[in-house]
């Protein structure tokens, strides 16, 4: 009996490993999934910054979030992230600084309930005197569906000490250029 169990196990192990392999050729992203991610995350993300609404921005993130700032070599769990973001939004408001953030993508990989999104963002600040400052950074976010809505569960960015530029930003693809993904 033990020999039969062993023989079956020997036959099934390679089959199980084969069943877990990814497809042999890259599969294009499903535009319907990307549109849902855009509606749940990227469009409201930009809107929250433009309108200065910290709570709307924070609500886009999972309570299991890890926020990683590569330039600063800093990891912030959800509790610290929410406190820091509320303080940042409050500080911008007090200083009468207007902010916008736009995203372009280098990679969008998603299935029905998980996604990996990489790209470049442009963060623009306009101070009370009208002086405009632009900053660029690479990002890599992991998203997961929670309660039927996409949420950011890991948010990593790194400006690479100024090496990420406007040209880098423009070389990436528009969020809604779904054929590129």
Image (cartoon, rainbow, N blue to C red):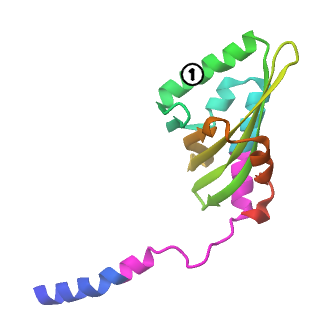
Q: Say whether residue 111 is left or right of residue 30.
A: left
Depth order, front residue of 50/128: 128
Depth order, front residue of 96/112: 96
Secondary structure beneath disc 1?
A: helix
Tell which residue pokes out farthest to the right in this image. Answer: 130
Find residue 37 and report its horizontal and vertical position in percent.
Answer: 69, 50
Q: Is residue 80 at least partly visible in the picture?
A: yes
Residue at 31 percent of width and 83 percent of height: 12
Residue linked to disc 1: 84
* Magenta run includes residue 18: yes
Residue at 81 percent of width and 58 percent of height: 177
Quadrant of res 87: top right
Find residue 119 and report its horizontal and vertical position in percent.
Answer: 68, 49
Span of residues in magenta: 15-40
> Is residue 113 placed above or below 169 in the rendered structure?
below
Residue at 70 percent of width and 45 percent of height: 120
Q: Is residue 63 at least partly visible in the picture?
A: no
Q: Say whether residue 131 is left or right of residue 9.
A: right
> Is residue 47 placed above or below 89 in the rendered structure?
below
Q: Alpha-carbon neighbours of circle 1 within 10 Å: few (<14), some, or many (≥20)? A: few
Find residue 19 and report its horizontal and vertical position in percent.
Answer: 44, 78
> Is residue 93 placed above or below 53 in the rendered structure?
above
Find residue 30 and report its horizontal and vertical position in percent.
Answer: 70, 65
Quadrant of res 134: top right
Quadrant of res 3: bottom left
Quick one: quadrant of the C terminus?
bottom right
Quick one: quadrant of the N terminus?
bottom left
* Magenta run includes residue 1: no
Q: Say whether residue 84 is left or right of residue 165.
A: left
Residue at 48 percent of width and 26 percent of height: 79
Tell which residue pokes out farthest to the top in this image. Answer: 94
């Amino acid at each position: 009996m033990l020999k039969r169990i062993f023989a079956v196990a020997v036959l099934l192990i390679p089959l199980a490993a084969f069943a877990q392999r990814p497809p042999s050729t890259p599969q294009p992203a499903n535009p319907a999934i990307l549109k849902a991610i855009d509606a749940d995350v990227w469009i409201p993300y930009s809107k929250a910054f433009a309108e200065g609404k910290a709570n709307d921005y924070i609500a886009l993130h999972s309570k299991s979030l890890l926020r990683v700032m590569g330039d600063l070599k800093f990891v912030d769990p959800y509790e610290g992230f929410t406190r820091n973001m509320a303080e940042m939004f409050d500080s911008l408001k007090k200083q009468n600084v207007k902010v916008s953030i736009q995203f372009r993508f280098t990679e969008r990989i998603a299935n029905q309930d998980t996604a990996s999104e990489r790209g470049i963002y442009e963060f623009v600040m306009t101070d009370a005197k009208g002086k405009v400052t632009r900053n660029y950074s690479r990002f890599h976010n992991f998203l997961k569906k929670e309660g039927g809505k996409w949420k950011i569960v890991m948010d990593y960015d790194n400006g690479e000490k100024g090496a990420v530029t406007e040209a880098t930003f423009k070389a990436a693809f528009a969020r809604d250029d779904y054929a590129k993904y």
